[in-house]
Image: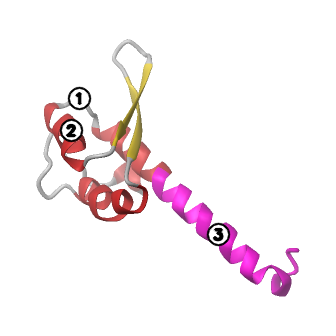
Amino acid sequence: MIGQAFCPHKVTEGNPCLEYIEYILSPKSGRFAVLCKESDGSNTNRTYSKIDELREDYRSGTLHPDDMKLALAKAINDILQCCDIKLLDLAGPSLGVH
């Protein structure tokens, strides 16, 4: 589960969540969107197109680990859902789906 992943606050070196975003998600989509919960209870959308910007916000504490992990989980689920749909389309007749 991504929610329990090792993601040390303000640490960018050796952070598996950041590495997953940098090497797997960013090359695929070119961006990474995060919905951040603010201290006043409001939400702020941030979209990163450069990994250096994401790293800087994370290092400074502007981006909280929980917000990043939620966005990471959503991005992974979006990719997997797309794969599910394509696989069902391919296997549909043999599975009796269509």
Q: Nearer the viewer, residue 51 or 18?
A: 51
The 10 Å Cα crowd at callout 3, few under 14, some 14 to 19, many 20 or more, is few
* Mark 1 vs mark 3, CA separation in Å: 34 Å
Relative to residue 36, is residue 69 depicted above or below? below
Please name the amino acid that badge 2 sits on: Tyr
Q: Position of residue 4 (x, y in %)?
A: 35, 52
Q: Earlier in the sequence, mark 1 or mark 3?
A: 1
The kind of secondary structure element at disc 1 is loop
Question: Do the residues bearing badges 1 and 3 touch, measured as CB atoms within 8 Å?
Answer: no
Q: Position of residue 5 (x, y in %)?
A: 32, 54
Q: Which residue is mark 3?
A: 84
Q: Position of residue 71 (x, y in %)?
A: 42, 44
The kind of secondary structure element at disc 2 is helix
Q: Residue furthest bottom?
A: 94
Q: Is residue 58 left or right of residue 93?
A: left
Quadrant placement of the C terminus = bottom right
Instruction: Report the span colored magenta.
Output: 75-98
The disc at residue 58 is 2
Picture residue at 32% right of the left edge, 45% below the top = 49
Say whether residue 91 is magenta. yes
* Mark 2 vs mark 3, CA separation in Å: 32 Å
Q: Residue furthest top?
A: 40
Q: Which residue is mark 1?
A: 62
The kind of secondary structure element at disc 3 is helix
Question: Do the residues bearing badges 2 and 1 touch, measured as CB atoms within 8 Å?
Answer: yes
Q: Earlier in the sequence, mark 2 or mark 3?
A: 2
Quadrant placement of the N terminus = bottom left
The quadrant holding residue 65 is: top left
Relative to residue 76, is residue 12 depicted above or below? above
Q: Main secondary structure of the magenta part?
A: helix
Please name the amino acid that badge 3 sits on: Asp
Picture residue at 61% right of the left edge, 62% below the top = 81
